[in-house]
Amino acid sequence: MPPSCPAGRSGAAARVGRKLTAGCYRACVTTSRPATPGLGRGTRVRGTRQAEALSLVLDGLPGFCSAQQIHAELRNRGEHVGLTTVYRHLQVLSEDGRVDAIRDSSGETLYRKCRSDAHHHHLTCRNCGKSVEVEGRAVERWAEQVAAEAGFTDVGHTVELFGRCPQCGPA
């Protein structure tokens, strides 16, 4: 990530070769299995001009951003995509496992294009937003055990791990 991009909500503009929206995060949390394409809400992202424009913006994001920030960047690029369309596409992409989504401390959902096809979790710094991938074998075993004991099948999960990175030091 370029050093000029904020890792947290600092109010500074994020940059990837040109000005992006403010307040992007670097973090990631996914569910244990991507949704099966064709299932869910019944809405799919088709190869429309709007979907292509959204994909290009997501490719350029340095970290997690809100739907409103993504919409603003689309408008900055001269794209005419409605905010509702942005939300709908992000929801479908998230359900399909192509976009990672997390909630910030205010409860707002933030999005980033998924950089891995494999199931993964991230540990995110509460202070600067730095994120590292972590293996969750113990979490996976625990989730399977709890589900089996309760008689559940086809179980997914979301795990959000937060702390302070070595550069930010102890609280």
Image (cartoon, rainbow, N blue to C red):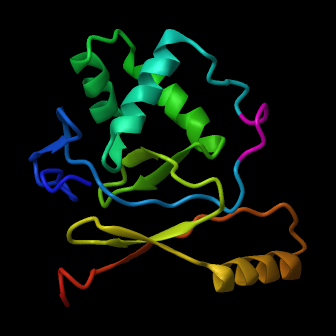
Q: Is residue 88 left or right of residue 161?
A: right
Tell me residue 101's x, y (percent): 48, 50
Quadrant in the picture for residue 39: top right
Q: Is residue 14 left or right of residue 104?
A: left
Quadrant in the picture for residue 91: top right
Q: Residue at x 47, y 15 (%)?
A: 50
Q: Quadrant of the N terminus?
A: bottom left
User: In the image, is residue 50 above or below residue 157?
Assistant: above
> Between 158 and 56, which is closer to the camera in this rendering?
56
Q: Residue at x 53, y 27 (%)?
A: 89
Residue 160 in view here:
no
Q: Is residue 38 magenta?
A: yes
Q: Is residue 10 magenta?
A: no
> Between 168 and 83, which is closer to the camera in this rendering?
168
Tell me residue 17's x, y (percent): 20, 36
Residue extent of the magenta highlight: 35-40
